[in-house]
Amino acid sequence: MKVTMSKRQERLVGYLLVAVVLALLVAEPVFAGTTSGGSSPFTSMVQLLTGWLKGGLGMLIALLALGVGLVAGVSRGSIGGALSCVGVAIAAYWGPDILQGIFGATVLAPHYVTVALL
């Protein structure tokens, strides 16, 4: 049996999906600062990769992107490919800090909530 929905019902389902997604996005930052205790076994690996990306490996990746961009730019007659190395260098250097800021974010309780709990 085929179920058909009117335009109004389709619109309501779409609004419901958007509301659910927004509710999940709003609730997610609340859990960002929670920890289960103990140390993470991946902390040393994260620090190692961050050091590599901010150091020699990041520079190597940016230089390789510059080389590929220059070759692509010469073949197409455009400098846009060579400029992409700047984006790669920015992503390699500041990307780990941005991700650390996202994953290490904590949510502070508003002042009135803190006072009410005391």
Image (spheres, rainbow, N blue to C red):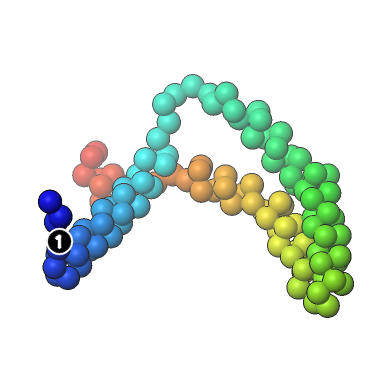
Instruction: Read off the residue under disc 1.
Output: 4
User: Which residue is situated farthest in the front direction here?
Assistant: 1
Looking at this view, is 98 or 75 the one in front?
A: 75
Mark 1 neighbour class, 10 Å CA radius: few under 14, some 14 to 19, many 20 or more? few
Secondary structure of the residue carrying tag 1 is loop
Q: Would residue 19 appear left or right of 30 to someone viewing this image?
A: left
Looking at this view, is 16 or 27 the one in front?
A: 16
Q: Would residue 33 appear left or right of 93 to someone viewing this image?
A: left
Residue at image location 86% in from the left, 60% down from the top: 67
The reply to whether residue 32 is in sight is yes
Three-letter amino acid code of the residue under disc 1: Thr
Q: Residue 8 appears in which quarter of the rendering?
A: bottom left
Total marks shown come to 1
User: Which residue is situated farthest in the bottom direction here?
Assistant: 77
Looking at this view, is 71 or 58 the one in front?
A: 71
- Location of residue 89 in the rendering, given as x and y in whole percent from the top left corner: 75, 57
- Location of residue 32 in the rendering, given as x and y in whole percent from the top left corner: 42, 42
The reply to whether residue 110 is in sight is no
Residue at image location 54% in from the left, 26% down from the top: 40
Residue at image location 85% in from the left, 66% down from the top: 70
Q: Residue 106 appears in which quarter of the rendering?
A: top left
Against 74, is 19 above or below? above
- Location of residue 118 in the rendering, given as x and y in whole percent from the top left corner: 24, 38
- Location of residue 110 in the rendering, given as x and y in whole percent from the top left corner: 31, 51
Residue at image location 38% in from the left, 47% down from the top: 29
Q: Residue 88 appears in which quarter of the rendering?
A: bottom right
Looking at this view, is 48 or 109 the one in front?
A: 48
